[in-house]
Structures are given as C-alpha cells and as structure tokens.
Image: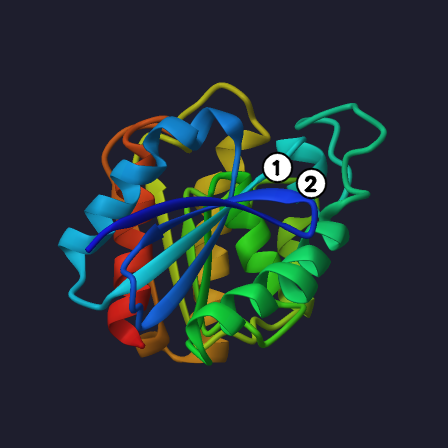
Amino acid sequence: MMLAEGLTVGGRTCRLFGAENPGCILVQPSARHENATLEAEAQQIAVLSKVPFVLATIELEDWVADLMPWPDGNVSRDPETGKHTQETLSYVLMALVPELLQRYGPLPIILGGYSLGGLFAIWASMQTDTFKAIAAASPSVWIHNWMSFAQKHVSLADYIYLSLGDQEEHVKNQAIARVGDNLRAQYALLQEHLGAEHCTLVWEEGGHFANNEGRLARAFAWCMDQL
C-alpha cells in the first residue's frame, strides 16, 4: 500500500512515499519544481521493482548552493555556491537517516537524485559508506574539475547506476557538452574500482529535461533489485 506523508526532520521539510513495511530506504534531495512529480516517481518505482520501499525526499532551499561540492561560474556566480554541500550531507547522515532507521529498522539505504542531485549522490558516496547504492540520473559531472576529483576518490557504495540522455552532450554550451565524455570516464573508473557487475551506464532518449521522474525511477529500481 502506497503511503504519502509529510514530516519535519531537523528543521527541514521531508516527504515520504512508498510501502508501510519497506525492505529498503531511498533518499532523494529534491527541488521545489520536482514536488509535482514525486508521487508519480514513487509509483513508477513500485511498478519497476517488487522490492517494497520508502522514498524520503528532502526539499532544499537552494538547489545549487546545497548540492554543488565546489564553486563553478558556469553553474552559478552566487558566492554561496559550494559552501553548503557538506551541510546537506551532514543533515542526511545526522538527522534524516537516524530518523528513518528508527522508524523502519536497519534497512539498506540508497541515495539518488537527478542532475545536481545525481552529482551530489556520487560525491556523497565518496565521503561515507552509509549508502549501499547510488542512483544518479543525468548527473552534472560536467562541472569544473569533477574528473580530477573523481580520479582521486573512490566510491564507497556497493552499486552505482548512471544514466544520461543521448542528446545531453550535443549542446552549444561547451562546459555542459563535456557531460558525455565525463560520464563515460566516470563509469570506467567505477568499473575499475567496484567491478563491472556493480555498476551500469544507461543511455536514455532525449535531452536533460525529458522524463526526469521516469529516469530516476529506473535508477532507483535497478539499485533496489541489486540489493
């Protein structure tokens, strides 16, 4: 039975979707523009995987400032960019995860997100072994110095799902156009470190803004089935 519940954890607004007795916990940072599609995303996950789950979403005040691991003028010139990502991860680890584990028991946790949310999920997996799997749909791995960082840091997750729209690298913006080559390079690193059977790279149809919730649902479902 699908549940939908709003709650406040550590002063932040969260929403829960999924089963009353889940077998795993999905955590997703979300922007306000995604609120309208979160329930549809949860319903698609339930169709794609037989594993019962609860999806916990965190509504962020500033999508860029809260998820960018460091400044990049191609993304934002706001001086706060790159200063709050560690705070976001600390909130997940110190407030949200303990609350969820208290509610549902010692279940495996999958962290996922779309775009900057996907980038944050990969980055977070290099900081902690809390997350058993990472669902990164169209992650913004084109940001300045990402591959230099990725080459020096190993993901501590057991499984990682990557996806990208097949038109995302065919754009005029030269910085964003790096996303295809960078994601291929990221996937190669993961294959080396985790093993080919522990990661996948899926090419979706369309550009960056095509069926975001469907892409993320497929990412979460793959991770759930691996666990």
Name the residue rendered at 43%, 30% in the picture: 34
Q: Looking at the image, is mark 1 or mark 2 earlier in the sequence? A: 1
Left or right of residue 74, residue 21 in this image: left
Whether residue 201 appears in this view of the structure is no
Name the residue rendered at 61%, 37% in the picture: 60
**Residue that label 2 marks:** 66
Q: How is the image coloured?
A: rainbow
The quarter of the displayed image where residue 93 is located: bottom right
Q: x, y (%) of residue 54?
A: 36, 59
Q: x, y (%) of residue 141?
A: 55, 46
Left or right of residue 94, residue 226 in this image: left
The amino acid type found where label 2 is placed reads: Asp
Name the residue rendered at 14%, 52% in the picture: 47
Please name whichever residue, 41 or 172, is drawn nearer the observer in this view of the structure. Answer: 41
Label 1 CA crowd tier, 10 Å (few <14, some 14–19, many 20+)? some
Please name whichever residue, 37 or 171, is drawn nearer the observer in this view of the structure. Answer: 37
**Residue that label 1 marks:** 60
The amino acid type found where label 1 is placed reads: Leu
Label 2 CA crowd tier, 10 Å (few <14, some 14–19, many 20+)? many
- Labels 1 and 2 touching (C-beta < 8 A): yes
